[in-house]
Amino acid sequence: MELNILYAAITILVGFTAAVIAYLVIGQLKKKAEQTETRLDDIILAAIGKPIVVVIIAASVYIAIIYFDVLPASFASVDTDKIVSAFFIIINAWVASVFSYSFIHTYGGVVAKKTDTDIDDRLIPMLATIIKYVIWFVALLLVLAEFQVDITPLLAGAGIAGIALALAAQDILGNFFGGAVITIDKPFKVGDRIKFDAFVGDVVQVGPRSTRIKTLDSRIITIPNKKLTDSVVINYALPDIQLKVFIPFSVAYGSDIKKVKKILLEIARDAAEKTPWVMTDPVPSVYFLEFGESSLNGQLLLWTNNYDNVWDVQDWINEQIDERFAKEGIEIPYKQIDVRMRDKK
């Protein structure tokens, strides 16, 4: 018996020595893998490195115990085959989880860097973590099944918990898939100016759950992605950042409308020549649109080269209209109310 214990100890010692050698060899292989262009060899070595060391040590312990019969008689009823099977299930799950996590992080990150939005940068780590936990959950079920533990209640409980979680997280999942739709369909990207509902602003972040826009008065508005995918969104940056500017005008009844249109076109041409905001192509145009209650109404249409300049254009044009109309004697009417009082006697 003492001789068997000695042989078993030597076997375990040899196993530990082989594990150390394997650890050093894998370390050298990792250094060489870092010098190659592909990252796949780095991922494979990272996945199998530590598990190989553990397998070598476990194998030496197994050989020492089984072949040299050093276990006490009380352990004779232990089913070593099931333990070995469970051990290799865990080792395989370890390798698979590390490999899948590293593979998705590495190559998914490369793909994510090529996109304009940052939502996929957030989705990649989430996907890698989910797959890792799924692998370990399947491994747990296989180990329990190996020891003939009834896993039906566990599966049923997991199914019920999954349904309850899905119902509780319905809005979260809706926003999550909404973010995926935005990433794929690309109705807008970070930096674009959009209008959603009553809000107008520049997109500053597209996240997995929500999108943030900075309004023109520098407020940050957080909008759930599901609402964006279910609603009409106006993107002022597509197909380009040029924008048509509408300048409404009203003149008094009796005004020479042709003269009014001529003056407005002259103002528009001056704006194109004297300001950096107004474009000459498309050419400005003036339309007389309606006979109002107390005025003749129309619009001056012109284009600005950047939607950021709309207020500058409106300010410059309106100042010129006020000045020219006053100079030409064109009356800009204002709403009047006539009040008549009757004396009751």
Image (cartoon, rainbow, N blue to C red):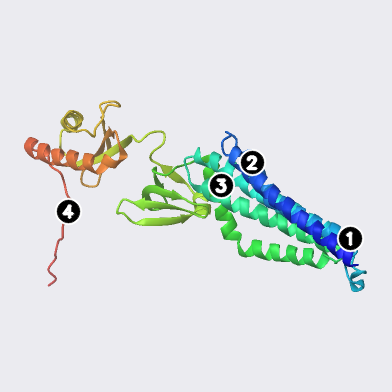
Tell me the residue that label 3 is attached to: 180
Mark 2 vs 3: CB contact within 8 A: no
Q: Point out the tag, 1 or 4, that comes first from the N-terminus.
A: 1
Q: What number is the disc on residue 200?
A: none
The N terminus - image quarter: bottom right
Judged from the image, the secondary structure of the residue bearing numbered disc 2 is helix
Q: Point out the tag, 3 or 4, that comes first from the N-terminus.
A: 3
Q: Point out the tag, 1 or 2, that comes first from the N-terminus.
A: 2
Q: Amino acid at mark 2?
A: Leu
- Can residue 142 be seen from the camera position used here? no
User: Which residue is depicted at the point 16% across and 57% down?
Assistant: 338
- Can residue 26 be seen from the camera position used here? yes
> Which marked residue is nearer to the observer: mark 1 or mark 3?
1
- Mark 3 to mark 4 CA distance (whole Å): 55 Å
Q: Position of residue 289 (x, y in %)?
A: 28, 37
Which residue is more in the foreground, 97 or 291? 97
- Mark 4 to mark 2 CA distance (whole Å): 90 Å
Which residue is more in the foreground, 140 or 83? 83
Give the quarter of the image for residue 6.
Answer: bottom right
Q: Amino acid at mark 4?
A: Gln
Tell me the residue that label 4 is attached to: 336
Please tell me how crowded label 4 is: few (under 14), some (14-19), or many (20+) other residues with Cα within 10 Å: few
Tell me the residue that label 2 is attached to: 29
306 to the left or right of 192: left
User: Which residue is depicted at the point 31% across and 54% down?
Assistant: 218
Mark 1 vs 3: CB contact within 8 A: no
> Which marked residue is nearer to the observer: mark 1 or mark 4?
1
Q: What number is the disc on residue 66?
A: 1
Judged from the image, the secondary structure of the residue bearing numbered disc 1 is helix
Judged from the image, the secondary structure of the residue bearing numbered disc 4 is loop
